[in-house]
Image: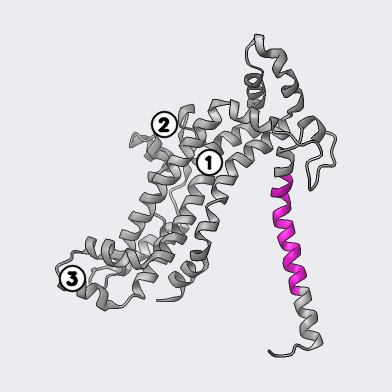
Amino acid sequence: MMKLSAGDKFLQVIIYATLLLLGFITLYPFWNSLVISFNMGSDTALGGITFWPRSPTLDNYEVVFRDSRIGHAFLISIMRTIVGTTLSVMFTAILAYGLSRHELMGRKIYMVFCIITMYFSGGLIPTFLLLREFGMMDTFWVLVIPGMISVYNMIIFRTFFLGLPAGLVESARIDGCNHIGVLTRIILPISGPVVATLSLFTAVYHWNDWFSASIYINNPDLIPIQTLLKQILNSNIVTDQLQKAIGSSAAAQDRLALVQSVTSKSLIMATTMVATLPIIMVYPFLQKYFVKGVLIGSLKE
């Protein structure tokens, strides 16, 4: 092992200290929100909650899960993430495969048209009018179809496909396989890291997106969890949740202590954790593909 000089050791100390500081700055807000969500709201209002709950309680989460809107919005987000990610990765891969084939006439022109959409768009109002004309307003598909093709993801897919040996496609074509068969039976099975990485990108987008539903959805039964969380932050919906926690007048006395321990801030933090933790739990399963998939799909051309 090479012996490090004093200057190199000092530089390593600076690098590790900087990384630790950046890691702390990044993780502390999330950890503090988690701590507040498990702390009694009336105690949190006194201040001083930093790294550990001072008065641990599950009352905040009890109030959250008593609201049926939370569960329904959670289900909508799960459905949107699964359906949206599946369709987006599938159709983006099909587009990328087509643009990677040298025999496609005018493929460079098509590629230019795709790249232009990354820098210019019709704007929010034309998009709203277009989706309304298609009859997609207040439907589940308005959350899925507009984001079904990602040009950025398509470029990563296409770059990876261009780096594959041409003999793979040629041998499959000789054996009588059509282009759909080549893509589904040959190309995609060996594209695991890229598919996993872009699936993660797409899933995070669909799970975290609150803006689309706030513009295109008026039906409360179709609102995803992130949009509902935004409404909680901007309205008095917290009061409604507390009222539901109280229940009927016969049970009012039994729930009085619960309501007194919950505040708007603690309830918002608990709802934030419920909306955030599921997508965070996906990362460990795809982490091993993450860096490899991005590098494979971006360095070859």
Which numbered circle lies on residue 138? 2
- Frontmost residue, 54 versus 300: 54
What percent of the width, then of the height, locates residue 82? Answer: 42, 46
Q: Could you tell me which residue is drawn at 67 percent across and 23 percent down?
A: 242
* Residue tagged 3: 173
Is 19 on the left or on the right of 90, as rendered?
A: right
Query: Could you tell me which secondary element the residue under label 3 belongs to?
Result: helix
Q: Can see residue 215?
A: no
Measuring from the top left, give residue 125's x and y in whole percent.
46, 40
Q: Are there few (<14), some (14-19), or many (20+) residues within 10 Å of tag 3?
A: some
Question: Of helix, strand and loop, which mostly describes the magenta segment?
Answer: helix
The disc placed on residue 211 is 1
The reply to whether discs 1 and 2 touch (Cβ–Cβ < 8 Å) is no
Residue segment shown in magenta: 15-33
Q: Quadrant of the N terminus?
A: bottom right
Q: Where is residue 51 in the image (x, y as percent from the top left)?
A: 79, 48
Q: Where is residue 78 in the image (x, y as percent from the top left)?
A: 47, 41
Q: Which of the two residues, 104 or 174, is positioned nearer the viewer here?
A: 174
Q: Tell me the CA gap for discs 3 and 1.
A: 44 Å
Check residue 21 for magenta coloring: yes
C-alpha distance separating marks 1 and 2? 14 Å
Q: Give 161 or 174, whichever is nearer the viewer.
A: 174
Give the vertical position of 286 relative to 295 (above or below): above
User: In this image, 66 relative to 53: left or right?
Assistant: left
**Amino acid type assigned to the residue bearing label 3 in the image:** Arg
- Could you tell me how far apart the alpha carbons at marks 2 and 3 are, in whole angstroms? 44 Å
